[in-house]
Image (spheres, rainbow, N blue to C red):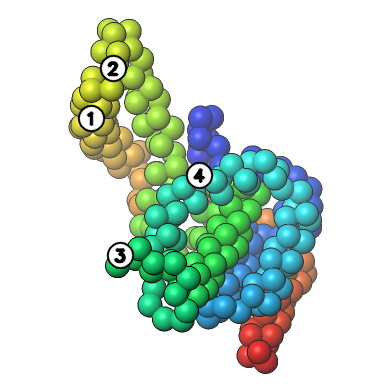
Amino acid sequence: MLLHVGAFKLDIDSKQNTPWHAIAPRTRLLCALLFVFAVVLTPNGHWKTWAVYGIGLLSLILIARLTITELLKRLAVEFAFIGVVLVGTLFREGGQVIWSWGILKITTVGLTILASVSIKAMLSLTMLNLLTLTTSVPALLHGMKELRIPPLLVATLASMYRYIGVLIAEFEAMRRAALSRNLMNNNRSIRLVVGNTIGALFIRTYERGNRIHQAMLSRGYQGIPPMEKIAPGGKQDIVALTLTLLLALLGQVIYLRT
C-alpha cells in the first residue's frame, strides 16, 4: 500500500521476527483491545490486578523486542497532554485530608484515584504504543477492515496518516519563509506568525483536500483505500488470544477475591 511518510513513521519495529510479529494484525488488534478493556474496567485501588497486567505487558515488550527509548519518548509526549487531566483527579472529597489550601484539598481518596488513573493510562498507552510500533499502518488498516470496522472510519484514518506528512512539510516551508524574512525575531512576532501560518495552512489543506478528493474519484475511488494482502492467521493467533484472555481473567479473579 502507498502509506509511507518518511517524516512521520509509526511502525519502526514492524520488521522484527518474533512470535508477536508472527500473528495476524487483526489478532494483535484484538489482543490490544482486550488488554485495554481489562485494565480500564478494573475499579480504582486494585494494585495486585494491575501488577499482573504490568508483568504480562512487560513480558510482551521483551518478546516483541521493542525499542525502549522510542517507547519512552512517546509515553512522555502523551503524558504531557493528559497530565492536566490526571492532576484534576487529585482534588476529590472523601477520606483523610493530607493537605489543604483554601478550597483545594488533597485526600487519601484523591491520591488513590490519581494513582489508579495514572496506572490505567500508563498500561493502556504502553499497549497501544506497542501495537503501533510493531504493526505497519497498512497492516493495521487491513486488520480493521477484517474486523468489520466501518469503512468510512478506516478510510479517514488512512487519509489522515497519508497526508499528515504533507501538512508537516507545508508548515515547515511556511516557517522557513517567515524566518528568511526575519519575521520571528521576538515572542510577539512569533505568536503572530504562528497564528497566521495555522490559518493559512487550514485554507491550503482545505483546498488541496478538495482537489485530491476529485482526483481520487476520477480514478475510481469508492471510499476504501487499496489494501495489501496480509497472510491469514493460524494456530499462533489462537494461542495469543487465549493467553491474553487468561491474563485478563487472572487479573479479574485476583480483583474479585480481594
Q: Are marks 4 and 3 in contact (CB under 8 Å)?
A: no
Residue marked by disc 4 = 77
* Residue indicated by mark 3: 102
For the point 68% across and 77% down, the residue is 48
> What residue is drawn where x is 49% and y is 60%?
145
> Of the residues tagged 4 and 3, which is closer to the observer?
3
Circle nearer the N terminus (2, 3):
3
Residue under label 2 = 186
Write down the residue under mark 1.
195
Q: Residue at x 78, y 54 (%)?
A: 62
Q: Measure how far apart labels 1 and 4 are at the Cα level.
A: 23 Å
Q: Earlier in the sequence, mark 2 or mark 1?
A: 2
Question: In this rendering, does residue 162 appear at all?
Answer: yes
Q: Are the two marked residues, 2 and 1, in contact with CB atoms closer than 8 angstroms?
A: no
Q: Amino acid at mark 1?
A: Gly
Q: Earlier in the sequence, mark 4 or mark 2?
A: 4
Q: Is residue 212 left or right of residue 1?
A: left
Q: Quadrant of residue 187?
A: top left
Task: Name the side, left or right, on which 235 lies relative to 127.
Answer: right
Three-letter residue code for mark 2: Asn
Q: Which mark is residue 209?
A: none
Q: Say which element carries label 2.
A: loop
Q: Is residue 238 above or below residue 166?
A: below
